[in-house]
């Protein structure tokens, strides 16, 4: 089982919830979780243990978000395709993804994770510029990851399980046109 599927199970993400999460509003508004957490932990010096309340609100928002939006009317939006690609990536141990998609998403996840450590350090020492720099790194890694998921979705959506992999013209540099 992939780490991503383990996380999805922790969030109790079934097919219906994944479809709701594919709503562009769900994807875009999930980006508010990190700033809310940063502000919450930053405020610990002023509100002490009450910091638990905004932290819980941010975590609750992270959990509720994929549940409150309706499924998208169309899956043509970039964010919807990114979610569909994430599902394909999450299940790569069951349905293999093309070879040119196997390394970069892992690298981008590592970049985002390292960025999160930097954000935590910046918040811990109350260094606003370091915190913001690392947040940019987190978001850059995440948005690039989502872009790769759109590319992955374009490459796998028409290839049922067991069918030979599609072969792009330039697997490193090419990107499907919308």
Image (cartoon, helix red, strand yellow):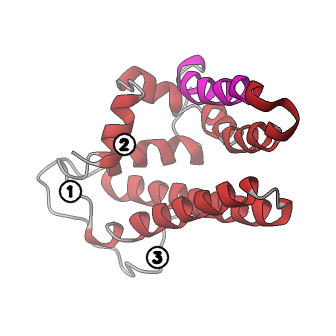
- Tell me the CA gap for discs 2 and 3: 22 Å
Q: Are marks 1 and 2 in contact (CB under 8 Å)?
A: no
Residue linked to disc 3: 174
Spatial distance from mark 3 to mark 1, Cα to Cα?
20 Å
CB atoms at circles 3 and 1 under 8 Å apart? no
Q: Which residues are magenta?
A: 51-68
Across and down, in percent, residue 78 comes to: 58, 48
Left or right, 113 with respect to 130, comes to left
Answer above or below: position of 108 versus 60: below
Q: Residue at x 63, y 59 (%)?
A: 138
Choose between 152 and 144: the one closer to the eye.
Answer: 144
- The residue wearing badge 2 is 87
Residue 125 image-quadrant placement: bottom right
**Numbered label attached to residue 96:** 1
Q: Is residue 69 above or below residue 43?
A: above
Label 1 to label 2, Cα distance in Å?
12 Å
Q: Quadrant of the C terminus?
A: bottom right
């Amino acid at each position: 089982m992939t780490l991503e599927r383990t996380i999805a199970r922790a969030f109790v993400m079934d097919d219906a919830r994944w479809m709701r999460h594919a709503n562009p509003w769900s994807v875009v508004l999930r980006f508010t979780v990190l700033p809310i957490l940063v502000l919450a932990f930053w405020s610990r010096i002023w509100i002490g243990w009450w910091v638990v309340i905004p932290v819980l609100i941010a975590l609750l928002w992270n959990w509720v978000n994929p549940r409150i939006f309706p499924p998208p009317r169309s899956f043509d939006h970039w964010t919807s395709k990114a979610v569909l690609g994430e599902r394909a990536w999450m299940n790569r141990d069951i349905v293999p993804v093309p070879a040119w998609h196997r390394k970069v998403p892992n690298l981008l996840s590592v970049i985002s994770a390292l960025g999160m450590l930097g954000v935590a350090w910046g918040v811990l020492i109350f260094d606003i510029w370091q915190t913001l720099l690392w947040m940019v790194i987190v978001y850059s890694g995440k948005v690039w990851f989502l872009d790769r998921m759109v590319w992955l979705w374009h490459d796998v959506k028409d290839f049922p399980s067991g069918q030979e992999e599609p072969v792009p013209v330039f697997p490193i540099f090419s990107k499907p046109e919308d």
